[in-house]
Image: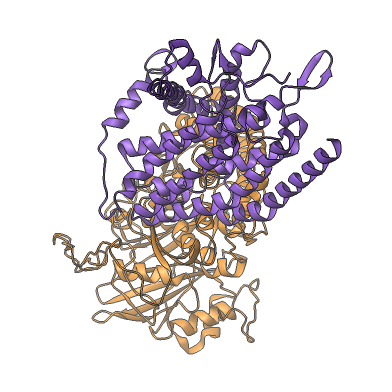
């Protein structure tokens, strides 16, 4: 990796104005196409690497959040949404138009490793070809798929027939030649430890992993396309619950709410923001409890008591969420401009239930520390396994507990504040270990921070004057954001940076709706952690990544 | 006390029924073996579908089976019918008859081990089938056959997970069988015999009297270090947490038993449970005074049952609480740690016994 170049000038903290950036890029910029969140520079499709290198090396834009591609009437377009890990409010979009008839554009993979999967997805769904990409195959759809579903001329009525010879059974493949003494092993798509339908193509040398390649897409449900055919105001909000469905629903809803509210310039009442903040942190606790529970399954085996204990605690917070939203899994509680209804009556009962839960929580966390983190066998298994150095994590666009477990101090709740977070007293948790143990520890400590946030929210809500409890801003029945406005906005989901890119075309439905899934980027780091380790370490690393396939595949 | 060896179970039948011919002795032996085998299988029947679930549920704050019968006990016949009624799926490419022999070999080898275990008296009957002079060596030999079964299953299944499980089973058993037997040998040094009744008999003497309570000279009290060492090695021998590596469902699906279903699956499970009980029985005989305990000698069998079920509960506790070690860590613990400690224990014991005697 070319991380340490002599000409590296890492002045990431320096904020440059759009004009200074344009001056820095010089002739590379052929046009400006500013987005609501960031200045946008249009460049030629053969200068992608050069442009991104300059921005990364000389301007400190070290985080490629997402690559969103789309097709226009007259061209294809890929957008590289860049940020800084040190300050994610400094954003820049690199817009790369490509020829309508021959959509070829240079790959960004040598500059940002994370572009590998993002560009494969753009190729798969839109049809942009990335020149120089090391492995430009379909990623979400089967290899035999005909056409690119999000492109304009895609015929969705045409049946997709994957004939048997084409769609070969991977079990029958002979992944062995006369020379090698390695063994090919399919871990998944159905396996006790893949946390969903994930397929790991693994090459083993004895028990040691030579190579592991995650094969995703088994749970692809066209979430982006469905959002594109729904109206902003009402029809999109139920879908986010189904991305990271492990009870992180409100966090996902917030991602859409934030992007759409900023796009349509909607101001959310403060009271609703407090409720959102509280609900979102409850979801985070539920999600982290499940991560802890399943990680214990992976390490201890399937009769472990820790699993049921953590599920039990998750159940408590799940009950609170049920009281708040009326649902246990698919909450559909946020609305653009607020939330759907106020706290449940009687309010005192809800507050006392919440406080009971918060009072009980430290005891539970202590118990988990007794049961697992202070167990010597557990430490033997998790410390110094699944190493992800911070530079590698950044290069892959890792976010959330995965990045924070590698000491990357990046949390959008603090760094790019939204909701009520900046008014509250809490800390961002980081651990320096870079291993499976650190990632678990980050989650366990984050649960305690979330509890702090919830407690402050409850205090605020309890004292909120009755006549100022405004849960919903005035939002027009039909939203039609201005034509050709584009926005990328992200929130800190349970697994990391959950972002939404929306392009409006003047109608009441988005012209392009792109989901930046944190799990998608985080899962890409698995080979870095797993290669050279033993099978149990791969399982542990996968568990510590805490991927939800519903969000990876969308 | 040092009582004379008690009358064995087959001899008791011969005497009671007056069967003096060779055929009579053979028949009596078969009847006795049938009785003992069924006692063990009955334990397994209770442990597998019911007790294990109840115990695990108690550890994990759940209720478990309680729908049919008192305390859900009728789940035992229900599970038996359900498991045996399932389709036996024979995957393509399995290596028969190896694939078929493996699930029979596992419970058979474990059951065979009980032929030399003195299980104590119940009334006039002494539940002990045979007492050869090398009984102690024999029981380990029988228990070791289990690994052959696991390798057969792993190799014959034509499945990569099974193969990995089989390989792990071999590696694990090599790493742990030697410390296990070397540690057990320290008990032999104390007793001065390989005969099961002799080892049990040597533990009946009083070690010390504390506050009027006589502490018997069980080897667990005489040499607690060897006891802990043996207990650990025994967990690896029977493949339970933290050493359930050959199965490791979250890693290699089910290891050697991945491809087995229906009756074969039941046989494997049966074998594993019998193996746990055999492990408990060896532990009881070697370190916990066999069937001895308070009260008359004629209820010894009850104490024996308490001891092996106590060991069973211990394995379940370990399953609920202790993480699994990695295969390379296990081998390291076995070869670099346990082996050294067990030899140290053996030499020390030999020196101490030599000096005192």
- Residue B101 vertical placement versus A498 (above, below): above
Please provide percent x and percent y for residue A84: 57, 68
| Quadrant of res B235 | top right
Q: Against B29, is B187 above or below?
A: below
Question: Hey, which residue is sitting farthest front in the picture?
Answer: B21
**Image quarter of the N terminus of chain B:** top right
**Quarter of the image where one finds residue A245:** top left
Q: Please name whichever residue, A179 or B50, is drawn nearer the observer in this view of the structure.
A: A179
In the rendered structure, the colour chosen for chain A is: orange
Classify A527 as above or below B263: below
Q: Which chain is purple?
A: B
Residue nearest the observer in this picture, B213 or A347 = B213
Tally the marks.
0
In this orientation, which residue lies closer to the viewer: B232 or B220? B220
Please identify the residue farthest to the left as the structure is shown.
A158
Q: Is residue A328 visible?
A: no
| The C terminus of chain B, quarter of image | top right
Along the line of sight, which residue is nearer the eye, B96 or A303?
B96
From the top left corner, tell me how far across and down residue A387 is, in percent. Answer: 59, 63
Q: How is the image coloured?
A: by chain
Image x and y of residue B186, in percent = 71, 40
- Residue at horizontal 47 percent and vertical 58 percent from the top: A518
State the residue at coordinates (72%, 52%).
B340
Position of residue A451 in the picture relative to residue A221 (left or right): right
Q: Position of residue A115 (x, y in %)?
A: 44, 71
**Residue A387 in sight in this render:** yes
Picture residue at 68% right of the left edge, 49% below the top: B338
Instruction: Give the left or right position of residue A168, taking residue A37 as reference.
Output: left
């Amino acid at each position: 990796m070319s991380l340490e170049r002599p000409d590296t000038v890492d002045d990431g903290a320096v904020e440059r104005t759009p004009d200074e950036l344009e001056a820095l890029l010089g002739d590379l910029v052929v046009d400006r196409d500013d987005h609501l969140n960031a200045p946008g520079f249009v460049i030629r499709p053969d200068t992608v690497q050069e442009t991104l290198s300059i921005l990364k090396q000389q301007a400190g834009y070290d985080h490629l959040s997402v690559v969103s591609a789309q097709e226009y009437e007259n061209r294809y377009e890929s957008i590289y949404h860049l940020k800084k890990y040190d300050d994610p409010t400094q954003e820049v979009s690199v817009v790369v138009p490509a020829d309508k008839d021959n959509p070829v554009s240079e790959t960004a993979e040598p500059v940002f490793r994370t572009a590998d999967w993002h560009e494969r997805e753009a190729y798969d769904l839109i049809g942009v070809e990335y020149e120089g990409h090391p492995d430009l195959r379909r990623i979400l759809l089967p290899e035999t798929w005909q056409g690119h579903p999000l492109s304009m001329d895609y015929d969705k009525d045409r049946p997709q027939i994957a004939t048997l010879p084409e769609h070969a059974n991977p079990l029958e493949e002979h992944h062995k030649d006369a020379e090698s003494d390695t063994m090919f092993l399919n871990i998944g798509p159905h396996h006790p430890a893949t946390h969903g339908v994930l397929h790991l193509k693994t090459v083993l040398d004895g028990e040691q992993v030579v190579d592991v390649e995650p094969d995703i897409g088994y749970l692809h449900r066209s979430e982006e396309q469905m959002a594109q055919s729904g109206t902003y105001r009402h029809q999109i909000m139920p879908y986010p619950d189904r991305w990271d469905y492990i009870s992180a629903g409100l966090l996902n809803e917030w991602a859409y709410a934030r992007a759409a509210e900023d796009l349509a310039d909607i101001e959310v009442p403060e009271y609703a923001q407090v409720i959102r903040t509280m609900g979102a942190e409850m979801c985070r606790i539920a999600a982290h409890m499940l991560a802890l529970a399943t990680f214990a399954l992976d390490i201890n085996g399937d009769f472990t008591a820790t699993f049921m204990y953590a599920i039990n605690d998750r159940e408590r917070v799940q009950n609170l969420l049920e009281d708040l939203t009326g649902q246990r899994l698919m909450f559909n509680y946020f609305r653009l401009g607020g939330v759907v209804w106020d706290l449940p009556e009687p309010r005192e009962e809800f507050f006392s239930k919440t406080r009971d839960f918060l009072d009980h929580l430290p005891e539970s966390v202590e118990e988990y520390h007794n049961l697992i983190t202070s167990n010597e066998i557990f430490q033997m298994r998790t410390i110094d396994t699944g190493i992800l150095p911070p530079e590698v994590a950044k290069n892959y666009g890792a976010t959330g507990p995965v990045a924070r477990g590698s000491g990357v101090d990046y949390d959008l709740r603090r760094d790019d504040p939204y909701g009520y977070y900046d008014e509250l007293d809490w800390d961002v948790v980081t651990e320096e270990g870079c291993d499976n143990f650190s990632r678990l520890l980050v989650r366990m400590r984050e649960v305690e921070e979330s509890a702090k946030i919830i407690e402050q929210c409850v205090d605020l809500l309890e004292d909120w004057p009755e006549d100022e409890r405004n849960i919903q801003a005035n939002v027009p029945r039909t939203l039609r954001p201005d034509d050709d406005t584009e926005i990328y906005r992200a929130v800190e989901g349970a697994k990391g940076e959950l972002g939404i890119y929306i392009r409006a075309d003047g109608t009441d439905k988005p012209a392009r709706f792109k989901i930046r899934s944190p799990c998608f980027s985080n899962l890409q780091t698995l080979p870095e952690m797993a290669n050279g380790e033993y099978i149990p370490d791969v399982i542990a690393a996968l568990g510590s990544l805490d991927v939800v396939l519903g969000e990876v595949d969308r | 006390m040092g009582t004379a060896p008690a009358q064995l179970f087959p001899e008791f039948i011969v005497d009671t029924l007056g069967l003096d011919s060779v055929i009579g002795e053979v028949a009596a032996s078969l009847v006795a073996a049938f009785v003992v085998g069924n006692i063990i299988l009955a334990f397994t029947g209770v442990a597998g579908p019911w007790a294990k679930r109840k115990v695990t549920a108690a550890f994990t704050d759940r209720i478990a089976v309680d729908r049919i019968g008192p305390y859900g006990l009728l789940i035992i016949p229900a599970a038996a019918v359900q498991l045996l009624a399932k389709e036996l799926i024979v995957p393509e490419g399995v290596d028969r008859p190896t694939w078929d022999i493996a699930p029979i070999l596992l419970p058979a080898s474990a059951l065979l081990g009980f032929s030399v275990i003195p299980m104590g008296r119940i009334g006039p009957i002494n539940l002990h089938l045979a007492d050869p002079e090398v009984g102690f060596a024999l029981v380990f030999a029988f228990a070791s056959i289990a690994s052959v079964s696991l390798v057969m299953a792993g190799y014959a299944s034509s499945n990569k997970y099974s193969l990995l499980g089989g390989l792990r089973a071999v590696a694990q058993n090599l790493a742990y069988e030697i410390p296990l037997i070397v540690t057990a040998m320290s008990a032999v040094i104390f007793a001065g015999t390989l005969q099961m009744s002799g080892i049990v008999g040597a533990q009946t003497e009083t070690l010390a009297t504390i506050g009027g309570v006589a502490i018997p000279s069980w080897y667990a009290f005489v040499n607690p270090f060897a006891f802990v060492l043996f207990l650990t090695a025994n967990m690896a021998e029977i493949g339970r947490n933290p050493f359930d590596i050959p199965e490791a469902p979250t890693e290699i699906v089910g290891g050697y038993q991945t491809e087995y279903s229906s009756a074969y699956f039941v046989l494997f499970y049966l074998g594993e449970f019998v193996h746990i009980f055999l492990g408990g029985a060896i532990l009881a005989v070697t370190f916990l005074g066999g069937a001895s305990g308070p009260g008359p000698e004629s209820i010894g069998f009850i104490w024996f049952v308490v001891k092996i079920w106590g060991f069973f509960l211990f394995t379940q506790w370990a399953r609920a609480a202790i993480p699994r070690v990695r295969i390379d860590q296990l081998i390291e613990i076995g070869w670099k740690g346990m082996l050294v400690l067990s030899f140290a224990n053996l030499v020390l014991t030999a020196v101490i016994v030599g000096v005192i005697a």
